[in-house]
């Protein structure tokens, strides 16, 4: 057996990466090291973990071979196995790329000498978070999986609540905690059910279980709940907007870019256990994806908080990934290899792509917030002149997330579209997937509207507020990771062929794909995309040269913007985020339930008194449905409070009574 | 083969302004005027190209890049559509998605250039453009899915050559619905009456014209040319679905295609002459109606 990276086993490399990132926070605990030096060492360790882990993941994807390791500890629910397969390895790539970028970014965004109180907490838990993410991917037994899952959830809680002196942050943290533990509860049920079926807590091999068995339905529903809560699929997304908005920006980047994807990984892994999958599984997941995509982006349009807006776009993109998974499942139900390859390949590529461009956008948002100290879009404006590089990278991220050619978002959406269209060509029940294509187009159109709004109001026009007028470009530690992510977005968009073998390896677990080799390079026009991307850039260069030469030889004057005859325009007259979105929010009002204050101009007075205007889009699922429901539930169940009186000896009595009853039950 | 590609490129580059000339001439004749010469749009482009430029102090490089990106995207889209019975220069499986998304790319940069001026008028235009764009894109995809289902092909060339000819005898109902949807789409995407009035000077009621208020000289010329090209490309799409017979190949085929395009522009001119512009609030309703037509067409093909 030969391994790509210096003959070292990929699983061992991954374990090395886990160890390195888990220990990356340690330097900050050493007194003799200055905090700044310790932070640099911390970042260095994360970079090292990235190099080690990525080489392991890529060699596993290319060679497909890796060793399984049995953890010889006397933990309950054994045996415990760590292993790396191509599906896990594919998820390692975005995790480490984003973690590395965020870590470098923190040198400029969260420097040790400016945050002496929080730097230890944020760095140590960041390292643990990355380690736990990788751990979940290589865990092959329920026990190890759940240990990693919980470390990940708790570490994420602590980095998310770094600014825990703010009430808003604490609320967001608690909400996140409640949701993640509800999810974990579902996972306990899922793994117990699986163990009851297979007789072992080891995760089953691919396609070993029967999808038509009654327990399979329960497993699917528990998986949809447990992993859906982590992925933030609508309507389980309630924790996501406030958590992403209130975390420090590089933490938002890793949460949105990577932690949500662990939910996707869990779902795909769970689905991989089953064979003979019923058609309704695929249709359910496809429908969830469509709902999440359309409603997620619709809510994004109504937001005024830059990071909340980006958070809603994560919900949209998770929806797009679900659509891909749904296509693959429908293909599996109909025995169509083409749909499986295109759907799953598109979903997995979108996992990588979304990690890259969403991290880029959150880091860009972080630079803006770092420069002007607010998340309110309407208080920004004209930042392109002040922060040209941040603006350029943010623009790249925006084009990519809208799925526009020639960047990476287009490639993964094209694969999913091809899956949908190919489904339409097949007669047998798969034709229903055709209906998802117009919805995906709607999502694309709404995303364009939303990002035109963001770019226009944040970066273009003139600065409306003195804050924005004093903004400055951040230093290289913040620009470098953004530039790197933007470059990756462009490279994947222009040369998707390079990723094709990795994607094919990552879907090769599917039994239908193992029988007959079907290649992404022949089923999707990946080579054409390179050609068309280059043609587009070439045409653009040609036109630019043509236009610039014409400009140089003709007269150019500068003047004020044409105000249609009005001589004294002020920056306050510019279109704001609310006014830009007003038309769409109005069209979507039954869904978004906007509220606010609209001034009524009196008819008689010549000079009306000053008035005010406000508009808000609430988190409908949480604020209008769930919280009222929970309040009602609390009213009716308050008598149960008597059980919780704070007296320790009585609590011990409860435990004893429970154990006694269980013992009697067991002996019966 | 090579000759056809050269003719395709030359037609895409040279013919679009003529369509605008024909539309304007039709409107003039309907209104009882003699009207401008058919080649007037070419004269105007030449005049704008010779002129100097005025740039707003507020604008940045994005303002200058907007028209260039939009034109580059539209030119690339023009290479994907078959003109008449001839194969387009570029055709591959999945090019229909690229075709739709190239227009979205053009929209993205046109609206950004409008917002770069900081003018609230252009903000209004941009907001309307993206709002209506959200409604037109699903219509296009509904039609594309329906055509793909009927033709069994996933490239625009296969789709459209099947639609004009083979499909009419058995799929006339679906095709008629699609023609209706696509014609509404053509008018909306190119900002013609009843969606937008390309000749109005009332900034508050316009969409496309108000977005380009601040562009001048050569850049404005590129925008006008790009708009004509978009009309030409989408018009070719409509023509293929609308014609109940295949357009032949060879010289006669090219001639037939050109005549068809001119007739299509006369139709657009007639619609503009007999209709008034819709109130902005009613525009979404008409677009949703187009989506309904396309959805019915899809239903007829899926059954």
Image: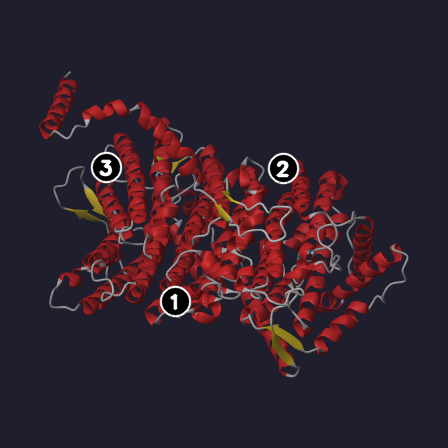
Residue A215 is situated, as x and y percent measured from the top left of the image, at 34, 28
- Residue underneath mark 1: A484
Q: Chain of mark 1?
A: A
Q: Nearer the viewer, mark 1 or mark 2?
A: 1
- Asked if residue A648 lies left or right of residue B74, the reply is left
Q: Is residue A418 visible?
A: no
Q: Are the residues flagged by discs 3 and 2 from a single subunit?
A: no
- Asked if residue A550 lies left or right of residue A484, the reply is right
Q: What is the C-alpha distance between the residues marked 3 and 2? A: 45 Å
Q: Chain of mark 3?
A: A
- Residue underneath mark 2: B302
- Residue underneath mark 3: A201
Q: How many marks?
A: 3
User: Mark 1 touching mark 2, by CB under 8 A?
Assistant: no
B55 up-or-down from B195: above or below: below
Q: Secondary structure at mark 3?
A: loop
Q: Nearer the viewer, mark 1 or mark 3?
A: 1
Q: Residue sitting at 12 percent across and 63 percent down? A: A30
Q: Quick one: A29 or A99, which is closer to the camera? A: A29
Res B3 quadrant in image: bottom right
Q: Is residue A144 visible?
A: yes
Q: Residue sitting at 16 percent across and 22 percent down? A: A662
Q: What is the C-alpha distance between the residues marked 1 and 3? A: 41 Å
């Amino acid at each position: 057996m030969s391994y790509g990276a210096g003959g070292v086993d990929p699983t061992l490399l991954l374990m090395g990466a886990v160890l390195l990132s888990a220990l990356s926070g340690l330097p900050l605990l050493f007194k003799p090291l200055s905090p700044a030096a310790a932070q640099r060492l911390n970042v260095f360790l994360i970079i090292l973990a990235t190099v080690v882990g990525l080489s392991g993941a890529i060699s596993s994807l290319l060679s497909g071979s890796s060793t399984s390791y049995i953890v010889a500890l006397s933990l309950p629910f054994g045996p415990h196995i760590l292993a790396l397969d191509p599906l896990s390895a594919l998820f390692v790539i975005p995790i480490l790329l984003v973690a590395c970028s965020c870590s470098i970014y923190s040198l400029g965004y969260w420097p040790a000498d400016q945050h002496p109180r929080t730097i230890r907490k944020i760095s140590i838990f960041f390292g643990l978070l990355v380690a736990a993410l990788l751990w979940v991917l290589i865990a092959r037994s329920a026990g190890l999986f759940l240990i990693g899952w919980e470390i990940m959830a708790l570490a994420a809680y602590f980095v998310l609540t770094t600014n825990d002196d703010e009430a808003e942050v604490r609320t967001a943290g608690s909400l996140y905690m409640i949701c993640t533990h509800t999810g974990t509860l579902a996972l306990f049920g899922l793994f117990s059910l699986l163990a009851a079926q297979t007789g072992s807590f080891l995760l089953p091999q691919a396609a070993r279980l029967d999808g038509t068995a009654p327990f399979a339905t329960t497993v699917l529903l528990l998986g949809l709940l447990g992993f859906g809560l982590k992925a933030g699929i609508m309507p389980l997304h309630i924790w996501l907007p406030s958590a992403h908005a209130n975390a420090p920006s590089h933490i938002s980047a890793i949460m949105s870019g990577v932690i949500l994807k662990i939910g996707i990984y869990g779902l795909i892994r769970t689905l991989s256990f089953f064979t003979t999958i019923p058609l309704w599984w695929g249709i359910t997941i496809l429908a969830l994806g469509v709902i999440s995509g359309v409603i997620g982006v619709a809510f994004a349009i109504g937001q005024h908080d830059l990071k909340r807006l980006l958070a809603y776009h994560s919900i949209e993109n998770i929806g797009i990934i679900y659509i891909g998974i749904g296509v693959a499942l429908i293909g599996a139900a109909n025995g169509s290899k083409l749909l499986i390859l295109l759907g799953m390949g598109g979903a997995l590529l979108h996992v990588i792509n979304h990690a890259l461009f969403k991290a880029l956008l959150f880091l860009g948002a972080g630079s803006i917030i770092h420069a002007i100290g607010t998340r309110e879009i309407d208080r920004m404006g004209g930042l392109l002149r002040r922060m040209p590089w941040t603006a350029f990278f943010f623009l790249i991220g925006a084009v990519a997330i809208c799925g526009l050619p020639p960047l990476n978002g287009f490639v993964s959406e094209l694969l999913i579209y091809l899956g949908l269209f190919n489904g339409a060509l097949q007669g047998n029940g798969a034709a229903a997937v055709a209906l998802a294509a117009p919805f995906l187009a709607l999502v694309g159109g709404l995303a364009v509207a939303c990002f035109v709004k963001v770019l226009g109001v944040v970066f273009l026009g003139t600065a409306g507020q003195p804050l924005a007028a004093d903004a400055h470009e951040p230093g290289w530690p913040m620009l470098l990771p953004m530039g790197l992510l933007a470059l990756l977005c462009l490279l994947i968009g222009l040369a998707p062929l390079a990723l094709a073998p990795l994607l094919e390896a990552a879907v090769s677990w599917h039994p239908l794909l193992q029988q007959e080799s079907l290649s992404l390079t022949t089923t999707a026009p990946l080579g054409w995309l390179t050609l068309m991307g280059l043609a587009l850039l070439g045409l653009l260069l040609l036109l630019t040269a043509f236009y610039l030469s014409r400009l140089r030889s003709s007269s150019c004057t500068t003047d004020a913007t044409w105000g249609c005859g009005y001589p004294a325009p002020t920056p306050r007259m510019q279109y704001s985020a609310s006014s830009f979105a007003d038309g769409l929010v109005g069209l979507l009002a039954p869904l978004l339930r906007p509220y606010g204050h609209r001034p009524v101009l009196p008819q008689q007075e010549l000079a009306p008194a000053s008035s005010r205007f406000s508009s808000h889009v609430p988190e409908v699922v949480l604020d209008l449905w769930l919280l009222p429901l929970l309040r009602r539930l609390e009213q009716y169940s308050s008598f149960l409070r008597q059980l919780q009186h704070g007296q320790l000896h009585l609590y011990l009595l409860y435990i004893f009574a429970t154990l006694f009853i269980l013992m009697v039950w067991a002996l019966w | 083969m090579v000759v056809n590609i050269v003719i395709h490129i030359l037609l895409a580059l040279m013919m679009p302004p003529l369509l605008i000339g024909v539309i304007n001439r039709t409107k003039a004749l309907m209104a009882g005027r003699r009207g401008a010469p058919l080649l007037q749009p070419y004269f105007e482009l030449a005049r704008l190209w010779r002129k100097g430029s005025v740039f707003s102090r507020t604008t940045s490089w994005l303002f200058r890049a907007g028209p260039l990106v939009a034109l580059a995207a539209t030119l690339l889209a023009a290479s994907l559509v078959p003109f008449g019975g001839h194969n387009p220069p570029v055709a591959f499986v999945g090019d229909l998605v690229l075709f739709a998304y190239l227009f979205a790319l053009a929209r993205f940069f046109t609206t950004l250039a409008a917002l770069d001026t900081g003018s609230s008028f252009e903000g209004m235009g941009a907001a309307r453009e993206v709002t209506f764009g959200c409604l037109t894109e699903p219509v296009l995809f509904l039609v594309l899915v329906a055509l793909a289902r009927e033709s069994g092909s996933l490239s625009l060339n296969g789709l459209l050559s099947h639609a004009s000819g083979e499909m009419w005898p058995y799929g006339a109902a679906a095709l008629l619905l699609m023609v209706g949807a696509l014609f509404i789409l053509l008018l909306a995407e190119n900002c013609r009456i009843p969606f937008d009035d390309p000749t109005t000077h009332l900034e508050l009621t316009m969409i496309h014209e108000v977005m380009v208020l601040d562009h001048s000289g050569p850049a404005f010329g590129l925008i006008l040319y790009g708009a004509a090209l978009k009309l030409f490309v989408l018009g070719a799409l409509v023509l293929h679905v609308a014609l109940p017979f295949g357009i032949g190949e060879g010289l006669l085929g090219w001639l037939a295609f050109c005549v068809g395009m001119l007739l299509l522009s006369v139709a657009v001119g007639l619609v503009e002459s007999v209709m008034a512009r819709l109130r902005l609030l009613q525009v979404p309703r008409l677009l949703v109606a187009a989506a309904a037509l396309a959805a019915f067409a899809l239903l007829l093909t899926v059954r």
